[in-house]
Amino acid sequence: MALAQDTRRNLDLDTALAEAEHRYLDANPRSLARHEAAKASLPGGNTRSILHYAPCPLTVIRGAGCRIWSLDGAEYLDFLGEYSAGLYGHSNPAIVAAMTAALEAGVVFGAPNLHEARFAAELCARFPSLERVRFCNSGSEADLMALSLARAVTKRDKILAFEGAYHGGFLIFGHGGSPLNVPFPMVMGRYNDIAATRDQIATHGQDLAAVILEPMLGAGGCIPAAPGFLEMLREETTRHGILLVFDEVITSRLSPGGLQAARGVIPDLTTLGKYLGGGGSFGAFGGRADLMDRFDPAQPDCLFHAGTFNNDVLTMAAGHAGLTEVLSPEVLEALNARGEVLRAALNGLFQAEKLAICASGLGSILSVHFRPGPILAPEDLEGEDPRLKQLFHLAMLERGIYLSPRGMMALSLPMGDSETDALLEAVAGFIEDTRPLLPRA
Ligand SMILES: Cc1ncc(COP(=O)(O)O)c(C=O)c1O
């Protein structure tokens, strides 16, 4: 492997990183050129912030199954899985057929179509909290709609969310938040801190419209809710007349009925997104009929929910085909079991090497952290050296593994043992080549 000589030269982290960036740029001149040219019309060459990373992102031109190909001609195993939206892999035949048939029959009707209600029925049958659901175009929009609905029906202002959480582009609570956040008055809690959150709800209870959280923090580090945390939130929100909102944009794939079914805690409202659109632009929010029926347009005091592409024919057809023709409960459970095996193997590797590195997550979603495990709360990630993450990311790309710069991975249905074995081999190679630079347990 190219990095082997680095160990012998006993590099420091900054030098190793600079050399890795150099090799990356040498290997990907076309991606670099495209990125530079794109800057003329896109700020920083980018139209989706998360897809930027140093020294420049790869341009991807093709995908098939669980593989993608870059503009520079390299093949990668796609362990990013489009941040969990790529669960079906690339161009699943059932989804391609459904989208092709929809496309051929026309896609901009300006009317209800045949796909939307049957897709909605499928979602309501799967996720216990969904008595009714409405579609939108992204998870960000779904979260905004759910919280706006909560504020409208409770006639209260405040929202309780958790430090480190990500609920889309207008509700960012990690890394110091965002000036673009929606200006709702927020109460910020500490994820998995049962006692402190109970106190906060008691203090602000009369003013809180909703408590929103993911039953496993996704972008916040793949940290599952601690035993008792969700139960406490269910109990306290009910006691104070606050709506409990589960953002299951990512976690809905962690069991056939979402994490709410697996954990046996049913929220008032749920938001969905990503893979459920079958690869189309997608978001959905739903829950108790008495809340969602406020959108019934035949009612005199109804709430108005707009969106030209809310019932986008292509997405509705793709999402429905995915759920009914591909993603049976057994198929989903097998994917999550594969993820459990992979996470255990990664943690076994880190422990055998006596490294303070761990893989967190649940089922088919995992994240590698350069911190000792287990990661039980966002505080456990403090002090992680971002240079190690960047070095890991570039080293994995160099070994043909495509994953997120923050170390998050989402498995896809086309993956088998040979793909997860290849990942393990790549991680072992990375350890071998950079051992002196890695944190010791
Ligand atoms: C938990 C969670 N909620 C909401 C969103 C926003 O979804 P979208 O990117 O479709 O707007 C994301 C996206 O990563 C997410 O992870």
Image (cartoon, rainbow, N blue to C red):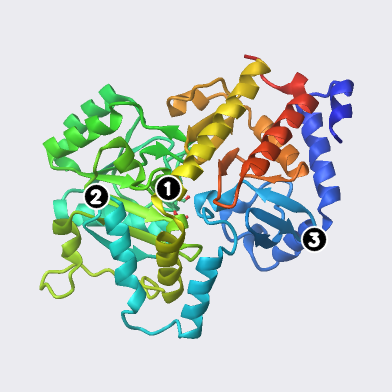
Label 2 near ligand 1 (CB < 8 Å)? no
> Which residue is the site of mark 3?
33
Question: Which is nearer the eye, 33 or 334?
Answer: 334
Q: Where the N terminus falls, by quadrant?
A: top right
Q: Is residue 323 left or right of residue 335?
A: left
Element class at badge 3: helix
Question: Which is nearer the eye, 171 or 337?
Answer: 337
Residue 306 appears in the rendering: no
The kind of residue on which mark 3 rests is: Ala
The kind of residue on which mark 1 rests is: Glu
Picture disc at residue 378: none
Does 394 appear above or below 91?
Answer: above
Which residue is located at x 34 percent, y 79 percent?
A: 113
Which residue is located at x 22 percent, y 52 percent?
A: 150
Which residue is located at x 42 percent, y 38 percent?
A: 217
Ranked by sequence position, the earlier of labels 1 and 2 is: 2
> Which residue is the site of mark 1?
330
